[in-house]
Structure formats: C-alpha cells, structure tokens
Image: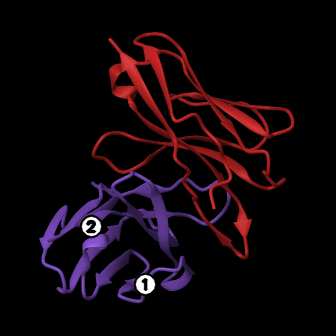
Amino acid sequence: DAKTTQPNSMESNEEEPVHLPCNHSTISGTDYIHWYRQLPSQGPEYVIHGLTSNVNNRMASLAIAEDRKSSTLILHRATLRDAAVYYCILRGLTSGTYKYIFGTGTRLKVLA
Amino acid sequence: DTAVSQTPKYLVTQMGNDKSIKCEQNLGHDTMYWYKQDSKKFLKIMFSYNNKELIINETVPNRFSPKSPDKAHLNLHINSLELGDSAVYFCASSPQGSAAEAFFGQGTRLTVV
C-alpha cells in the first residue's frame, strides 16, 4: 500500500540541518504530502504537510519538487530530541476513503 | 487534556482470552482509526470509522471487532487472542480531507503469552 520510498536510516550531528528525502513518483494531483514522526515508545505525531508549495512551521520545513514526485523534510537544527522515525505519507481520496498509509520510514539518529 | 487517549497502556494476557482496548478523542473529529505496529515497527491500518460508520477494514481477522458507540469513541475488541496478536495498537483521529492532520494516542502494548 505504501506509495513512498525513504532511506532506512540517516545520521546527523546535533545543531546541524537535516534533509530527509522522500520519493513518491505515483502521487496523484490531489494527494497531500504529510510527514509524521514517531519518537521512541510514543505514538506518531504530525510534523508538516503540503500540496505544491514549500511549507514552513515551527517544527520543520517541507520542500516539494516542482513535479511533486519527491519532497524533502528539513529540520533546521537537529537536537537530540529529534531522534525518531520519520514517515512520509501521501493522503488522498482512494476508493471513497482517506487513509494515512505508513511506509517503513527513516530512522534519524542525532549525534551529540 | 489528552487529545486521544487509550486504555490500558499495557495488556498482558493468555492465548485464547478476549480483551478490549478503549479509545477516546476530545477533538471533535469525524474519523477514527486503529493501527497495529508489529515487532518490526511497521504501522498498518486496521480500521477506520467515520461518524460511527465503518469505512475501512483492512483484511483484519474477524476476531477483531471495532465498536464505535459515538463519534468520540472507538473501541477494539479482540476474541480468542493468539500469540501473533502481540503488538502495539494505536488509536488515531482526524477530520476528513486530504489536508487533515491526524492525532495518535500513546499506544497499547498487547502481549499474548
């Protein structure tokens, strides 16, 4: 079901920016790109979402390619608390319903 | 005030037993979900309800029966528990729409022995 592809793991040094890539070559015109993260022993939490334009919020930025077939989640200054699994999700209307379909995600390790 | 709350947080039970997990959301969302996260950490959708009506059932064994008494609650009842049911179960809620943000509970770790 997952329609996104992400690297299994990435590492970053604390206080440095992190760019987490996601490929979604089969995205449809009305699918939104969502990012969630799951901290250890917690439920997933919303990070950011977008449709076509780049988006910024207090947690992160989302850069969306012009053809929408890929996107990048940007954490501007990684902290130890950002160590988590990051999921890139496409959400759209499929067979009359909306779903959040999680792939395998990217495990981000932040080094002190 | 917790947006999506699940009880219990931990559940240890023997094979063959019947158990329930409760979920409540105070966000006024129309849609609620149950997800299962197995030992490999893969999150898989099980069910989705919209305004108390089942809209997604992702080929889950019929030993699993969700029940939505009202829009704010979605409980999961599991009959005849098996070892393979051991997992973390997450409840979530969201408004409708492609741009909707989902809120997840903290999870219920079910261990079947």
Tell me the amino acid under the disc marked 1: Pro
Q: How many labels does the image show?
A: 2
Chain in red?
A
Q: Is residue A108 left or right of residue A49?
A: left
Chain in purple?
B
- Closer to us: B64 or A58: B64
Quickly name the residue at label 2: B86
- Closer to us: B106 or A57: B106
Residue at 54%, 54% (x, y): give it: A102
Is residue B61 placed above or below B92 in the rendered structure? below
Q: Where is residue B28 in the image (x, y as percent from the top left)?
A: 45, 67
Q: Where is residue B89 in the image (x, y as percent from the top left)?
A: 33, 64
Quickly name the residue at label 1: B61
Residue at 30%, 40% (x, y): give it: A40
Residue at 74%, 36% (x, y): give it: A70
Image quadrant in which the N terminus of chain A is located: bottom right
Is residue A112 placed above or below A60 in the rendered structure? above
Secondary structure under the numbered disc 2 in the rendered image = loop
Circles 2 and 1 on the same chain = yes
Image quadrant in which the C terminus of chain A is located: top left
Secondary structure under the numbered disc 1 in the rendered image = loop
Query: Residue under mark 1: which chain is it in?
Result: B
Using the rendered view, name the quadrant where residue A111 is placed: top left
